[in-house]
Amino acid sequence: MSHVGSSHVLAASSKHAARLALKTLATLLTGIALAACDSLNLAQVEAGAPRANPRPNIVIINVDDLGYGDISSYGAENVRTPNIDRLAEEGAMFTDAHAASAVCSPSRYALITGEYPFRNDFWLPVFATSPLVIDTSKTTIASLLKEEGYSTAAIGKWHLGFGDVDPVDWNGELAPGPLELGFDYYFGVPVLNSHPPFVYVENRHVLGLTEDDPLVYGKTAQTREFDEKFDYNVIGGGEAAHALYEDRKVGTLLTEKAIEWVRARKSEPFFLYFATTNIHHPFTPAPQFIGTSGAGRYGDFIHELDWMIGELLAALDEEGLADNTLVLFISDNGAMFNRGGQTAWEAGHRPNGDLLGVKFGAWEGGHRVPFIARWPGHISGGVKSSALVSNVDFMATLADLVGHPLNPTEASDSVSFLPVLLGRESGGRDQLVMSAARRDFLAIRKGKWVYLDGQGEGGFGGTRVGQHTFAGPAAAAFMGRQNSDIVDGRIRNDAPPGQLYDLEADPRQTENLYNERPEIVKMMQEQLRAEKAVD
Protein backbone atom coordinates (compact mmCIF):
# COMPACT_ATOMS: atom_id res chain seq x y z
CA MET A 1 0.00 0.00 0.00
CA SER A 2 1.42 3.38 -0.95
CA HIS A 3 2.06 6.22 1.47
CA VAL A 4 1.35 9.91 1.17
CA GLY A 5 4.41 11.87 0.20
CA SER A 6 4.75 15.35 -1.24
CA SER A 7 1.55 15.03 -3.30
CA HIS A 8 0.15 18.17 -4.80
CA VAL A 9 -3.44 19.04 -5.67
CA LEU A 10 -4.46 19.16 -9.30
CA ALA A 11 -6.83 21.85 -10.47
CA ALA A 12 -10.03 20.66 -12.14
CA SER A 13 -8.73 21.32 -15.64
CA SER A 14 -5.47 19.58 -14.87
CA LYS A 15 -7.35 16.59 -13.51
CA HIS A 16 -9.29 16.32 -16.77
CA ALA A 17 -6.08 16.50 -18.72
CA ALA A 18 -4.46 13.92 -16.50
CA ARG A 19 -7.43 11.60 -16.87
CA LEU A 20 -7.34 11.96 -20.64
CA ALA A 21 -3.63 11.25 -20.71
CA LEU A 22 -4.03 8.22 -18.48
CA LYS A 23 -6.92 6.86 -20.54
CA THR A 24 -4.99 7.39 -23.75
CA LEU A 25 -2.01 5.58 -22.29
CA ALA A 26 -4.26 2.80 -20.97
CA THR A 27 -5.78 2.36 -24.44
CA LEU A 28 -2.34 2.05 -26.01
CA LEU A 29 -1.21 -0.39 -23.35
CA THR A 30 -4.36 -2.49 -23.67
CA GLY A 31 -3.33 -3.75 -27.09
CA ILE A 32 0.10 -4.62 -25.76
CA ALA A 33 -1.34 -6.31 -22.67
CA LEU A 34 -3.84 -8.37 -24.62
CA ALA A 35 -1.27 -9.33 -27.22
CA ALA A 36 1.03 -10.47 -24.44
CA CYS A 37 -1.79 -12.15 -22.56
CA ASP A 38 -1.21 -15.60 -24.05
CA SER A 39 2.48 -15.74 -23.19
CA LEU A 40 1.96 -14.24 -19.74
CA ASN A 41 -0.80 -16.61 -18.73
CA LEU A 42 -0.22 -19.90 -20.51
CA ALA A 43 2.20 -20.80 -17.74
CA GLN A 44 -0.64 -20.38 -15.24
CA VAL A 45 -2.95 -22.74 -17.10
CA GLU A 46 -2.65 -26.36 -16.12
CA ALA A 47 -1.27 -28.66 -18.78
CA GLY A 48 -4.02 -29.84 -21.07
CA ALA A 49 -6.51 -27.18 -19.90
CA PRO A 50 -8.44 -25.32 -22.62
CA ARG A 51 -6.88 -22.03 -23.65
CA ALA A 52 -8.97 -19.03 -22.67
CA ASN A 53 -9.91 -16.32 -25.14
CA PRO A 54 -8.36 -12.92 -24.19
CA ARG A 55 -11.87 -11.45 -24.61
CA PRO A 56 -13.91 -13.52 -22.16
CA ASN A 57 -17.56 -13.70 -21.22
CA ILE A 58 -18.19 -11.43 -18.24
CA VAL A 59 -20.40 -12.02 -15.21
CA ILE A 60 -20.78 -9.35 -12.52
CA ILE A 61 -22.48 -10.64 -9.39
CA ASN A 62 -23.60 -7.57 -7.45
CA VAL A 63 -24.77 -8.77 -4.04
CA ASP A 64 -27.05 -6.72 -1.80
CA ASP A 65 -25.87 -5.63 1.69
CA LEU A 66 -23.26 -8.37 2.11
CA GLY A 67 -20.78 -7.19 4.73
CA TYR A 68 -17.02 -7.56 4.85
CA GLY A 69 -17.37 -10.28 7.50
CA ASP A 70 -20.33 -12.14 6.00
CA ILE A 71 -18.55 -14.94 4.13
CA SER A 72 -16.16 -17.55 5.43
CA SER A 73 -13.27 -16.62 3.14
CA TYR A 74 -13.34 -13.19 4.82
CA GLY A 75 -13.39 -14.63 8.32
CA ALA A 76 -17.02 -15.56 9.07
CA GLU A 77 -17.35 -18.59 11.34
CA ASN A 78 -21.10 -18.88 11.88
CA VAL A 79 -21.94 -19.25 8.20
CA ARG A 80 -20.55 -21.52 5.48
CA THR A 81 -20.01 -20.20 1.96
CA PRO A 82 -18.20 -22.97 0.03
CA ASN A 83 -19.19 -21.72 -3.42
CA ILE A 84 -18.09 -18.14 -2.82
CA ASP A 85 -14.95 -19.50 -1.16
CA ARG A 86 -14.33 -21.55 -4.31
CA LEU A 87 -14.23 -18.30 -6.28
CA ALA A 88 -11.58 -17.00 -3.86
CA GLU A 89 -9.56 -20.22 -4.10
CA GLU A 90 -9.64 -20.12 -7.90
CA GLY A 91 -9.19 -16.36 -8.23
CA ALA A 92 -8.13 -13.18 -6.46
CA MET A 93 -9.65 -11.97 -3.21
CA PHE A 94 -9.40 -8.25 -2.46
CA THR A 95 -9.04 -6.92 1.08
CA ASP A 96 -9.25 -3.18 0.27
CA ALA A 97 -12.21 -3.01 -2.12
CA HIS A 98 -14.92 -0.38 -1.71
CA ALA A 99 -18.30 0.67 -2.97
CA ALA A 100 -18.27 4.27 -4.19
CA SER A 101 -21.30 4.84 -1.99
CA ALA A 102 -22.44 3.18 1.23
CA VAL A 103 -26.00 3.34 -0.14
CA CYS A 104 -27.55 0.81 -2.52
CA SER A 105 -28.89 2.89 -5.43
CA PRO A 106 -25.97 5.35 -5.67
CA SER A 107 -23.55 2.41 -5.47
CA ARG A 108 -25.25 0.76 -8.46
CA TYR A 109 -25.09 4.06 -10.32
CA ALA A 110 -21.32 4.10 -9.80
CA LEU A 111 -20.86 0.54 -11.05
CA ILE A 112 -22.95 1.02 -14.18
CA THR A 113 -21.69 4.50 -15.16
CA GLY A 114 -18.12 4.64 -13.82
CA GLU A 115 -18.98 7.97 -12.20
CA TYR A 116 -19.14 8.99 -8.56
CA PRO A 117 -22.83 9.37 -7.62
CA PHE A 118 -22.23 12.58 -5.69
CA ARG A 119 -21.47 14.31 -9.02
CA ASN A 120 -25.12 13.71 -9.90
CA ASP A 121 -26.23 14.85 -6.42
CA PHE A 122 -27.29 11.26 -5.79
CA TRP A 123 -27.15 10.16 -2.15
CA LEU A 124 -30.20 8.08 -1.19
CA PRO A 125 -32.10 4.98 -2.38
CA VAL A 126 -34.82 5.36 -4.99
CA PHE A 127 -38.28 3.93 -4.43
CA ALA A 128 -41.48 3.09 -6.28
CA THR A 129 -42.21 6.58 -7.62
CA SER A 130 -38.73 7.35 -8.96
CA PRO A 131 -37.98 7.68 -12.67
CA LEU A 132 -34.71 6.41 -14.13
CA VAL A 133 -31.78 8.17 -12.44
CA ILE A 134 -29.20 7.48 -15.17
CA ASP A 135 -29.15 9.76 -18.21
CA THR A 136 -29.66 7.54 -21.27
CA SER A 137 -27.07 9.58 -23.17
CA LYS A 138 -24.35 8.27 -20.84
CA THR A 139 -22.10 5.42 -21.85
CA THR A 140 -22.70 2.56 -19.44
CA ILE A 141 -20.91 -0.67 -18.75
CA ALA A 142 -23.62 -2.45 -20.76
CA SER A 143 -23.67 -0.12 -23.75
CA LEU A 144 -19.88 -0.26 -23.94
CA LEU A 145 -19.82 -4.06 -24.03
CA LYS A 146 -22.77 -4.20 -26.39
CA GLU A 147 -20.83 -1.98 -28.80
CA GLU A 148 -18.00 -4.51 -28.55
CA GLY A 149 -20.27 -7.35 -29.67
CA TYR A 150 -21.45 -8.71 -26.33
CA SER A 151 -25.01 -9.87 -25.62
CA THR A 152 -26.01 -8.10 -22.43
CA ALA A 153 -28.51 -8.77 -19.65
CA ALA A 154 -29.41 -7.41 -16.23
CA ILE A 155 -31.14 -9.96 -14.03
CA GLY A 156 -32.18 -9.25 -10.46
CA LYS A 157 -32.58 -6.11 -8.39
CA TRP A 158 -32.57 -2.90 -10.47
CA HIS A 159 -33.21 -0.09 -7.96
CA LEU A 160 -32.34 2.75 -10.34
CA GLY A 161 -35.82 3.82 -11.39
CA PHE A 162 -37.96 3.42 -14.51
CA GLY A 163 -39.50 5.84 -16.96
CA ASP A 164 -39.15 9.59 -17.17
CA VAL A 165 -42.04 10.83 -15.02
CA ASP A 166 -42.61 11.00 -11.27
CA PRO A 167 -44.49 9.00 -10.13
CA VAL A 168 -43.77 5.99 -12.34
CA ASP A 169 -46.75 4.53 -14.21
CA TRP A 170 -46.38 0.86 -13.35
CA ASN A 171 -49.28 -0.06 -15.62
CA GLY A 172 -47.64 1.28 -18.77
CA GLU A 173 -44.38 0.82 -20.63
CA LEU A 174 -41.48 1.16 -18.21
CA ALA A 175 -39.15 3.12 -20.44
CA PRO A 176 -36.53 4.35 -20.27
CA GLY A 177 -34.96 1.63 -18.15
CA PRO A 178 -32.26 -1.03 -18.42
CA LEU A 179 -32.90 -1.59 -22.14
CA GLU A 180 -32.21 2.08 -22.87
CA LEU A 181 -28.86 1.80 -21.06
CA GLY A 182 -27.42 -0.98 -23.20
CA PHE A 183 -28.95 -4.13 -21.76
CA ASP A 184 -30.56 -6.43 -24.32
CA TYR A 185 -32.70 -8.11 -21.67
CA TYR A 186 -33.93 -7.38 -18.17
CA PHE A 187 -35.78 -9.55 -15.67
CA GLY A 188 -36.05 -8.87 -12.00
CA VAL A 189 -37.23 -6.98 -8.97
CA PRO A 190 -37.72 -3.35 -10.04
CA VAL A 191 -37.14 -1.65 -6.70
CA LEU A 192 -36.07 -3.95 -3.85
CA ASN A 193 -37.42 -6.82 -1.79
CA SER A 194 -38.50 -4.63 1.12
CA HIS A 195 -40.49 -2.06 -0.83
CA PRO A 196 -43.48 -2.04 -3.22
CA PRO A 197 -44.64 -2.83 -5.81
CA PHE A 198 -43.51 -6.47 -5.10
CA VAL A 199 -43.73 -7.59 -8.71
CA TYR A 200 -41.35 -8.77 -11.42
CA VAL A 201 -40.52 -6.70 -14.46
CA GLU A 202 -39.47 -8.29 -17.74
CA ASN A 203 -37.90 -5.84 -20.18
CA ARG A 204 -40.36 -2.91 -20.12
CA HIS A 205 -43.47 -4.31 -18.43
CA VAL A 206 -44.69 -5.67 -15.11
CA LEU A 207 -45.07 -9.41 -15.47
CA GLY A 208 -48.60 -10.78 -15.06
CA LEU A 209 -50.33 -7.41 -14.91
CA THR A 210 -53.93 -7.38 -16.19
CA GLU A 211 -55.90 -4.37 -17.44
CA ASP A 212 -58.82 -5.06 -15.11
CA ASP A 213 -56.60 -5.09 -12.00
CA PRO A 214 -53.98 -2.34 -12.26
CA LEU A 215 -51.42 -1.26 -9.72
CA VAL A 216 -52.74 1.80 -7.86
CA TYR A 217 -50.89 4.34 -5.74
CA GLY A 218 -52.43 4.81 -2.31
CA LYS A 219 -53.57 1.23 -1.86
CA THR A 220 -52.02 -0.99 0.77
CA ALA A 221 -49.29 -3.17 -0.68
CA GLN A 222 -49.38 -6.91 -0.26
CA THR A 223 -48.20 -8.04 3.20
CA ARG A 224 -44.64 -9.32 3.25
CA GLU A 225 -42.43 -11.03 5.82
CA PHE A 226 -40.72 -7.97 7.24
CA ASP A 227 -38.18 -7.60 10.02
CA GLU A 228 -40.01 -4.50 11.17
CA LYS A 229 -43.54 -3.19 10.95
CA PHE A 230 -43.55 -0.82 7.98
CA ASP A 231 -46.42 1.19 6.59
CA TYR A 232 -46.52 0.20 2.95
CA ASN A 233 -49.67 2.05 2.06
CA VAL A 234 -47.90 3.14 -1.11
CA ILE A 235 -48.94 1.07 -4.11
CA GLY A 236 -51.26 -1.92 -4.18
CA GLY A 237 -53.73 -3.70 -6.42
CA GLY A 238 -52.41 -5.79 -9.29
CA GLU A 239 -53.15 -9.02 -7.45
CA ALA A 240 -52.29 -11.24 -10.45
CA ALA A 241 -48.86 -9.63 -10.73
CA HIS A 242 -48.38 -9.72 -6.96
CA ALA A 243 -49.25 -13.42 -6.88
CA LEU A 244 -46.19 -14.19 -9.03
CA TYR A 245 -43.91 -12.65 -6.39
CA GLU A 246 -43.28 -14.95 -3.43
CA ASP A 247 -40.62 -13.82 -0.98
CA ARG A 248 -39.10 -17.24 -0.41
CA LYS A 249 -38.85 -18.02 -4.11
CA VAL A 250 -37.17 -14.82 -5.31
CA GLY A 251 -33.60 -16.12 -5.02
CA THR A 252 -34.44 -19.38 -6.78
CA LEU A 253 -36.28 -17.67 -9.64
CA LEU A 254 -33.59 -15.07 -10.27
CA THR A 255 -30.95 -17.82 -10.34
CA GLU A 256 -32.99 -19.87 -12.80
CA LYS A 257 -33.44 -16.85 -15.07
CA ALA A 258 -29.72 -16.05 -14.99
CA ILE A 259 -28.76 -19.63 -15.84
CA GLU A 260 -31.39 -19.85 -18.57
CA TRP A 261 -30.05 -16.68 -20.18
CA VAL A 262 -26.43 -17.85 -19.99
CA ARG A 263 -27.20 -21.25 -21.50
CA ALA A 264 -29.00 -19.59 -24.43
CA ARG A 265 -25.92 -17.47 -25.23
CA LYS A 266 -23.12 -19.94 -24.71
CA SER A 267 -21.96 -19.66 -28.33
CA GLU A 268 -21.44 -15.88 -28.27
CA PRO A 269 -19.68 -13.38 -25.99
CA PHE A 270 -22.03 -12.36 -23.18
CA PHE A 271 -22.17 -9.94 -20.28
CA LEU A 272 -24.45 -10.78 -17.37
CA TYR A 273 -25.11 -8.29 -14.57
CA PHE A 274 -26.61 -10.52 -11.88
CA ALA A 275 -27.87 -8.39 -8.99
CA THR A 276 -29.23 -10.48 -6.14
CA THR A 277 -31.78 -9.38 -3.55
CA ASN A 278 -29.90 -11.52 -1.01
CA ILE A 279 -29.05 -10.52 1.62
CA HIS A 280 -31.18 -7.37 1.95
CA HIS A 281 -33.92 -7.54 4.57
CA PRO A 282 -36.46 -9.09 4.91
CA PHE A 283 -34.42 -12.25 5.38
CA THR A 284 -36.61 -14.79 3.61
CA PRO A 285 -34.56 -17.75 2.35
CA ALA A 286 -36.21 -20.73 0.68
CA PRO A 287 -37.42 -23.35 3.20
CA GLN A 288 -34.44 -25.68 2.67
CA PHE A 289 -32.06 -23.03 4.03
CA ILE A 290 -34.01 -22.14 7.17
CA GLY A 291 -32.07 -23.06 10.29
CA THR A 292 -28.93 -24.10 8.40
CA SER A 293 -26.60 -21.41 9.77
CA GLY A 294 -25.39 -20.34 13.17
CA ALA A 295 -26.50 -16.76 12.56
CA GLY A 296 -30.29 -16.92 12.45
CA ARG A 297 -32.34 -15.87 9.45
CA TYR A 298 -29.55 -13.50 8.44
CA GLY A 299 -27.06 -16.36 8.11
CA ASP A 300 -29.64 -18.60 6.43
CA PHE A 301 -30.08 -15.93 3.76
CA ILE A 302 -26.31 -15.94 3.22
CA HIS A 303 -26.48 -19.71 2.77
CA GLU A 304 -29.12 -19.28 0.08
CA LEU A 305 -26.91 -16.68 -1.62
CA ASP A 306 -24.00 -19.09 -1.62
CA TRP A 307 -26.22 -21.76 -3.18
CA MET A 308 -27.26 -19.29 -5.90
CA ILE A 309 -23.62 -18.59 -6.73
CA GLY A 310 -22.91 -22.32 -6.78
CA GLU A 311 -25.75 -22.98 -9.23
CA LEU A 312 -24.47 -20.30 -11.59
CA LEU A 313 -20.89 -21.57 -11.39
CA ALA A 314 -22.10 -25.12 -12.02
CA ALA A 315 -23.94 -23.96 -15.15
CA LEU A 316 -20.76 -22.31 -16.44
CA ASP A 317 -18.91 -25.58 -15.81
CA GLU A 318 -21.57 -27.70 -17.50
CA GLU A 319 -21.58 -25.52 -20.61
CA GLY A 320 -17.78 -25.49 -20.84
CA LEU A 321 -17.73 -21.72 -20.23
CA ALA A 322 -15.88 -21.44 -16.93
CA ASP A 323 -12.38 -21.08 -18.38
CA ASN A 324 -13.51 -18.32 -20.70
CA THR A 325 -15.59 -16.33 -18.22
CA LEU A 326 -14.43 -13.50 -15.99
CA VAL A 327 -16.53 -13.53 -12.81
CA LEU A 328 -16.54 -10.43 -10.61
CA PHE A 329 -18.27 -10.89 -7.25
CA ILE A 330 -18.87 -7.81 -5.09
CA SER A 331 -21.32 -6.31 -2.61
CA ASP A 332 -23.07 -2.99 -3.22
CA ASN A 333 -22.23 -1.71 0.29
CA GLY A 334 -21.54 -2.89 3.80
CA ALA A 335 -23.95 -4.75 6.06
CA MET A 336 -26.82 -3.01 7.80
CA PHE A 337 -27.28 -3.44 11.54
CA ASN A 338 -31.06 -3.70 11.65
CA ARG A 339 -32.96 -6.27 13.70
CA GLY A 340 -31.78 -9.19 11.56
CA GLY A 341 -28.18 -8.05 11.83
CA GLN A 342 -28.53 -7.66 15.57
CA THR A 343 -29.91 -11.21 15.86
CA ALA A 344 -26.91 -12.50 13.91
CA TRP A 345 -24.61 -10.46 16.15
CA GLU A 346 -26.13 -11.96 19.27
CA ALA A 347 -25.39 -15.41 17.80
CA GLY A 348 -21.72 -14.46 17.45
CA HIS A 349 -21.68 -13.41 13.79
CA ARG A 350 -19.93 -10.15 12.83
CA PRO A 351 -21.49 -8.86 9.57
CA ASN A 352 -18.79 -6.24 8.91
CA GLY A 353 -15.99 -8.13 10.62
CA ASP A 354 -13.91 -5.89 12.87
CA LEU A 355 -14.62 -2.75 10.87
CA LEU A 356 -16.21 0.36 12.35
CA GLY A 357 -19.57 1.37 10.88
CA VAL A 358 -22.47 0.00 8.88
CA LYS A 359 -24.39 0.53 5.64
CA PHE A 360 -25.30 4.16 4.82
CA GLY A 361 -22.22 5.48 6.66
CA ALA A 362 -18.73 6.57 5.64
CA TRP A 363 -16.81 4.59 8.24
CA GLU A 364 -15.10 1.57 6.69
CA GLY A 365 -17.89 -0.88 7.53
CA GLY A 366 -20.28 1.07 5.33
CA HIS A 367 -18.35 0.77 2.10
CA ARG A 368 -15.43 -1.68 2.40
CA VAL A 369 -16.83 -4.83 0.80
CA PRO A 370 -15.88 -8.37 -0.19
CA PHE A 371 -14.66 -8.51 -3.79
CA ILE A 372 -13.47 -11.62 -5.61
CA ALA A 373 -12.42 -11.98 -9.26
CA ARG A 374 -11.97 -15.27 -11.13
CA TRP A 375 -10.73 -15.84 -14.68
CA PRO A 376 -9.00 -19.23 -14.96
CA GLY A 377 -5.61 -19.11 -16.65
CA HIS A 378 -5.42 -15.32 -16.39
CA ILE A 379 -6.04 -14.54 -12.73
CA SER A 380 -3.90 -16.71 -10.49
CA GLY A 381 -5.83 -18.71 -7.91
CA GLY A 382 -5.58 -18.18 -4.18
CA VAL A 383 -4.28 -14.62 -4.51
CA LYS A 384 -5.05 -12.10 -1.76
CA SER A 385 -4.65 -8.53 -3.02
CA SER A 386 -4.40 -5.37 -0.91
CA ALA A 387 -4.78 -3.09 -3.96
CA LEU A 388 -7.22 -0.19 -3.52
CA VAL A 389 -10.13 -0.77 -5.91
CA SER A 390 -13.78 0.23 -6.18
CA ASN A 391 -16.95 -0.79 -7.99
CA VAL A 392 -16.75 2.54 -9.83
CA ASP A 393 -13.64 1.07 -11.51
CA PHE A 394 -15.43 -1.86 -13.15
CA MET A 395 -16.23 0.11 -16.29
CA ALA A 396 -12.67 1.26 -17.02
CA THR A 397 -11.36 -2.21 -16.19
CA LEU A 398 -13.70 -3.93 -18.63
CA ALA A 399 -13.08 -1.26 -21.27
CA ASP A 400 -9.38 -1.96 -20.83
CA LEU A 401 -10.00 -5.69 -21.08
CA VAL A 402 -11.85 -5.51 -24.41
CA GLY A 403 -9.68 -2.73 -25.86
CA HIS A 404 -12.39 -0.08 -25.87
CA PRO A 405 -10.99 3.47 -25.58
CA LEU A 406 -12.89 5.77 -23.24
CA ASN A 407 -13.08 9.50 -23.90
CA PRO A 408 -12.79 11.97 -20.96
CA THR A 409 -16.59 12.29 -20.62
CA GLU A 410 -17.09 8.54 -20.23
CA ALA A 411 -16.63 6.80 -16.88
CA SER A 412 -14.84 9.92 -15.65
CA ASP A 413 -14.09 8.52 -12.19
CA SER A 414 -13.23 4.97 -13.23
CA VAL A 415 -9.67 3.62 -13.06
CA SER A 416 -8.70 0.28 -14.59
CA PHE A 417 -7.40 -2.38 -12.22
CA LEU A 418 -6.82 -4.90 -15.02
CA PRO A 419 -3.06 -4.93 -14.26
CA VAL A 420 -3.88 -5.99 -10.69
CA LEU A 421 -6.14 -8.79 -11.95
CA LEU A 422 -3.35 -10.04 -14.20
CA GLY A 423 -0.91 -10.15 -11.32
CA ARG A 424 0.86 -6.80 -11.50
CA GLU A 425 0.11 -5.33 -8.05
CA SER A 426 1.25 -1.85 -9.09
CA GLY A 427 -2.04 -1.20 -10.91
CA GLY A 428 -5.24 0.24 -9.48
CA ARG A 429 -5.67 3.60 -7.82
CA ASP A 430 -4.16 5.65 -5.00
CA GLN A 431 -7.11 7.97 -4.33
CA LEU A 432 -10.83 7.23 -3.94
CA VAL A 433 -13.94 9.12 -2.84
CA MET A 434 -16.80 7.37 -1.00
CA SER A 435 -20.16 8.94 -0.16
CA ALA A 436 -22.58 8.35 2.70
CA ALA A 437 -26.35 8.79 2.90
CA ARG A 438 -26.14 12.29 4.36
CA ARG A 439 -25.86 14.85 1.61
CA ASP A 440 -22.32 16.23 1.16
CA PHE A 441 -20.86 13.77 3.66
CA LEU A 442 -17.83 12.36 1.87
CA ALA A 443 -14.79 10.29 2.73
CA ILE A 444 -11.62 10.50 0.68
CA ARG A 445 -8.88 7.91 0.65
CA LYS A 446 -5.28 8.71 -0.25
CA GLY A 447 -2.77 5.92 0.21
CA LYS A 448 -3.00 4.79 3.82
CA TRP A 449 -5.03 7.83 4.89
CA VAL A 450 -8.79 8.28 4.94
CA TYR A 451 -10.41 11.63 5.72
CA LEU A 452 -14.10 12.11 6.58
CA ASP A 453 -15.53 15.56 6.08
CA GLY A 454 -17.66 15.62 9.23
CA GLN A 455 -18.38 13.95 12.55
CA GLY A 456 -19.81 10.45 12.92
CA GLU A 457 -20.45 8.28 9.88
CA GLY A 458 -23.08 10.32 8.03
CA GLY A 459 -25.63 7.53 7.84
CA PHE A 460 -28.65 6.42 9.84
CA GLY A 461 -29.01 7.94 13.29
CA GLY A 462 -31.03 5.43 15.31
CA THR A 463 -29.92 5.31 18.93
CA ARG A 464 -31.78 2.31 20.35
CA VAL A 465 -31.19 -1.40 19.94
CA GLY A 466 -33.98 -2.88 17.82
CA GLN A 467 -34.52 0.25 15.71
CA HIS A 468 -34.38 -0.28 11.98
CA THR A 469 -32.12 2.79 11.78
CA PHE A 470 -29.76 1.75 14.59
CA ALA A 471 -26.33 2.97 13.45
CA GLY A 472 -23.64 5.56 14.06
CA PRO A 473 -21.97 6.14 17.45
CA ALA A 474 -24.71 4.35 19.41
CA ALA A 475 -24.41 1.16 17.34
CA ALA A 476 -20.61 1.35 17.42
CA ALA A 477 -20.69 1.47 21.21
CA PHE A 478 -23.19 -1.41 21.35
CA MET A 479 -20.89 -3.52 19.15
CA GLY A 480 -17.89 -2.72 21.34
CA ARG A 481 -16.15 -0.70 18.66
CA GLN A 482 -13.69 1.78 20.15
CA ASN A 483 -13.33 5.24 18.63
CA SER A 484 -11.67 8.25 20.20
CA ASP A 485 -14.56 10.54 19.23
CA ILE A 486 -17.23 8.39 20.90
CA VAL A 487 -18.13 8.47 24.59
CA ASP A 488 -21.17 6.58 25.93
CA GLY A 489 -22.54 6.07 22.44
CA ARG A 490 -22.35 9.74 21.42
CA ILE A 491 -19.88 12.04 19.72
CA ARG A 492 -18.02 13.82 22.49
CA ASN A 493 -18.54 17.57 22.72
CA ASP A 494 -14.92 18.45 22.00
CA ALA A 495 -14.53 16.07 19.04
CA PRO A 496 -12.81 17.52 15.96
CA PRO A 497 -15.03 18.74 13.06
CA GLY A 498 -13.61 16.07 10.76
CA GLN A 499 -11.85 12.72 10.96
CA LEU A 500 -8.48 11.39 9.83
CA TYR A 501 -7.40 7.76 10.18
CA ASP A 502 -4.23 5.88 9.31
CA LEU A 503 -5.74 2.66 7.94
CA GLU A 504 -2.38 0.95 7.72
CA ALA A 505 -1.77 1.25 11.45
CA ASP A 506 -5.40 1.50 12.54
CA PRO A 507 -7.79 -0.34 10.18
CA ARG A 508 -10.51 -0.38 12.85
CA GLN A 509 -10.52 3.45 12.98
CA THR A 510 -10.05 3.66 16.73
CA GLU A 511 -8.00 6.88 16.82
CA ASN A 512 -9.01 10.10 15.06
CA LEU A 513 -5.74 11.87 14.15
CA TYR A 514 -7.37 15.11 12.98
CA ASN A 515 -5.69 17.23 15.67
CA GLU A 516 -2.39 15.35 15.63
CA ARG A 517 -1.74 15.54 11.86
CA PRO A 518 -3.01 18.95 10.65
CA GLU A 519 -0.75 18.89 7.59
CA ILE A 520 -2.35 15.64 6.39
CA VAL A 521 -5.83 17.01 7.14
CA LYS A 522 -5.08 20.08 5.05
CA MET A 523 -3.77 18.00 2.18
CA MET A 524 -6.82 15.69 2.26
CA GLN A 525 -9.23 18.64 2.38
CA GLU A 526 -7.52 20.13 -0.66
CA GLN A 527 -7.78 16.82 -2.49
CA LEU A 528 -11.47 16.60 -1.64
CA ARG A 529 -12.12 20.17 -2.79
CA ALA A 530 -10.38 19.35 -6.07
CA GLU A 531 -12.58 16.27 -6.53
CA LYS A 532 -15.72 18.30 -5.88
CA ALA A 533 -14.59 20.92 -8.41
CA VAL A 534 -14.40 18.41 -11.27
CA ASP A 535 -17.42 18.72 -13.56
Image: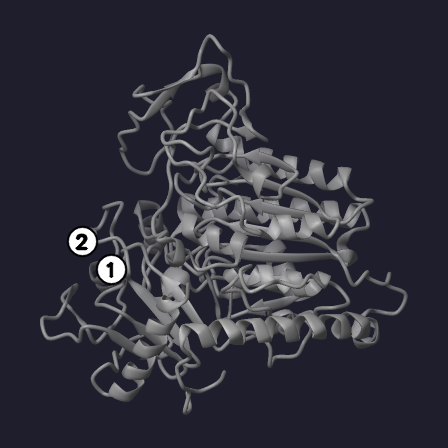
Q: Residue furthest bottom?
A: 6
Numbered label attached to residue 472: 1
Residue at position x 59%, y 59% in the image: 395
Question: Where in the figure is residue 199, as x and y percent of width and height?
Answer: 48, 27
Does 163 sit left or right of 38 as displayed? left
Question: Where in the figure is residue 391, as x and y percent of width and height?
Answer: 51, 60
- In this view of the protein, which residue sits in the foreground, 180 or 398? 180
Which three-letter amino acid code belongs to the residue tagged 2? Thr
Q: Which badge, 2 or 1, is on the more N-terminal residue?
A: 2
The answer to whether residue 44 of the structure is visible from this angle is no
- In this view of the protein, which residue sits in the foreground, 12 or 171? 12
Q: Secondary structure at mark 1?
A: helix
The answer to whether residue 224 of the structure is visible from this angle is yes
Q: CA distance from mark 2 to mark 1?
A: 8 Å
Res 13 → quadrant: bottom left
Q: Residue furthest right?
A: 48
Question: Where in the figure is residue 212, as x and y percent of width and height?
Answer: 46, 8
Residue at position x 32%, y 63% in the image: 357
Which three-letter amino acid code belongs to the residue tagged 1? Gly
Numbered label attached to residue 463: 2
Q: Secondary structure at mark 2?
A: loop
